[in-house]
Amino acid sequence: MAELTETKSDLRICCAGELVPVRQTLQHVRHFLSAQDIPYEVSADIDLVLSEIMTNIVEHGYKDAAGVIECDLVLNTASVECRMSDTGRAFDPSGAGHTAPDPATFAEGGYGWFLVRSLTSQLSYAREGDRNILYFSMQRQAADEPC
């Protein structure tokens, strides 16, 4: 289960680095975004980005060991910002997902970082001690929605 701290403009979650707790965490995030009147299109994009990142942490970062995923989601006037951290294996995504995978090869995986890059307005990674720190930002309004 996840530990939650919530205010009107931010949500802090700490969950086990396993698929079931990640799915439960994503449900909490969806409810939080809905309660804050985040447009469905934006909420769905945030959900997809978080799902891709958290699943990668579980499947690759914590492949051989248990761990925890921390997620701080902050709602600003024009953007939604997220800082995620984990103690899994180091993985710098700076070289991943800059171009779409070739659909002719139809691999099941390989689309995640391309989607993350396509949906975020800012994305950065750092390794601080034994922690992976991933930051991303997304626009709070849908592209076709007036501010």
Image (cartoon, grey):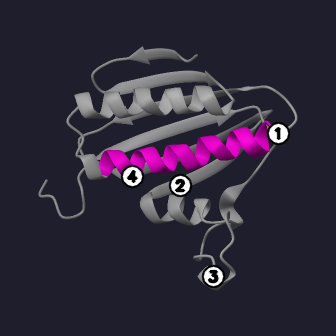
Is residue 35 shown above or below 137? above
- Residue 22 location, quadrant: top right
Question: Looking at the rendered structure, which numbered label has been put on residue 86?
Answer: none
Q: Secondary structure at mark 2?
A: strand
Residue pictured at 47% horizontal, 50% vertical: 48
Q: Secondary structure at mark 3?
A: loop
x and y percentages locating residue 112 in the rendered image: 59, 59
Circle 2 residue: 123
Q: Nearer the viewer, mark 4 or mark 3?
A: 3
Q: Earlier in the sequence, mark 3 or mark 2?
A: 3
Circle 1 residue: 63
Q: Nearer the viewer, residue 22 or 49?
A: 22
- Type of the residue with mark 4: Asp
Q: Earlier in the sequence, mark 4 or mark 1?
A: 4
- Type of the residue with mark 2: Leu
Question: Looking at the rendered structure, which numbered label has been put on residue 102?
Answer: 3
Q: Nearer the viewer, mark 3 or mark 2?
A: 3
Q: From the viewer's perspective, tell me whether residue 68 is left or right of residue 137.
A: right
- Residue 87 location, quadrant: top right
Contact between marks 3 and 1 (CB within 8 A): the answer is: no
Q: From the viewer's perspective, tell me whether residue 39 is left or right of residue 146.
A: right
- Type of the residue with mark 1: Lys
Q: Earlier in the sequence, mark 3 or mark 1?
A: 1
- Type of the residue with mark 3: Asp
Measured Cα–Cα span from mark 4 to mark 3? 22 Å
The crowd level at tag 1 (other Cα within 10 Å; few <14, some 14-19, many 20+) is some
Residue pictured at 77% horizontal, 45% vertical: 60
Q: Secondary structure at mark 1?
A: loop
Q: Main secondary structure of the magenta part?
A: helix
